[in-house]
Image: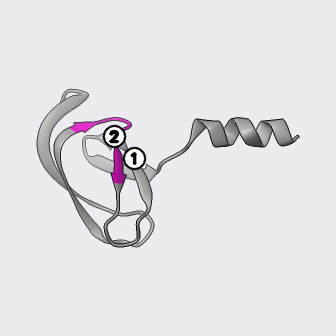
């Protein structure tokens, strides 16, 4: 599969285990919100589609400044 493809995928939320239907463009880094637990997730693999918790780069920079 190409890095960007239009299709529908059914994946599991890593936070609550709820099944999430993702339609449209499946691409790395696309943000997805779980409708069951409101977890902020992102697509980290496209074949098969896999979700992980989304990260905010500015949060990491802020933590480094605290040191």
Secondary structure beneath disc 2?
A: loop
Of residues 62 and 43, which is closer to you in this image?
Answer: 62
Secondary structure beneath disc 1?
A: strand
Q: Residue at x 20, y 27 (%)?
A: 2
Q: Are marks 2 and 1 in contact (CB under 8 Å)?
A: yes
* Quadrant of the rendering where the C terminus is positioned: top right
Classify residue 58 by image quadrant: top right
User: Residue 28's x, y, as percent?
Assistant: 34, 35
User: Residue 63's x, y, as percent?
Assistant: 76, 43
User: Residue 5's x, y, as percent?
Assistant: 16, 33
Question: For the magenta stretch, what is the residue range?
Answer: 26-32
Q: Residue at x 12, y 37 (%)?
A: 6
Of residues 44 and 66, which is closer to you in this image?
Answer: 66
Rendered position, 57 above or below 15: above
Q: Residue at x 59, y 36 (%)?
A: 57
Task: Determine whether, in the image, residue 38 is placed left or right of residue 55.
Answer: left
Task: Determine whether, in the image, residue 43 is placed left or right of residue 4.
Answer: right
Rendered position, 51 above or below 37: above
Task: Determine whether, in the image, residue 57 is placed left or right of residue 30.
Answer: right
Q: Is residue 44 magenta?
A: no
User: Residue 38's x, y, as percent?
Assistant: 41, 65
| Residue position for label 2 | 30
Q: Earlier in the sequence, mark 2 or mark 1?
A: 2
| Residue position for label 1 | 42
Classify residue 1 by image quadrant: top left
């Amino acid at each position: 599969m190409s890095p960007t493809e239009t299709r529908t995928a059914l994946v599991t939320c890593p936070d609550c285990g709820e099944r999430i239907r993702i339609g449209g463009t499946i691409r790395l880094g696309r943000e997805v919100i779980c409708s069951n637990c409101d977890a902020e997730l992102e697509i980290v693999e496209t074949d098969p589609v896999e979700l992980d918790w989304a990260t905010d780069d500015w949060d990491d920079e802020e933590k480094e400044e605290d040191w």
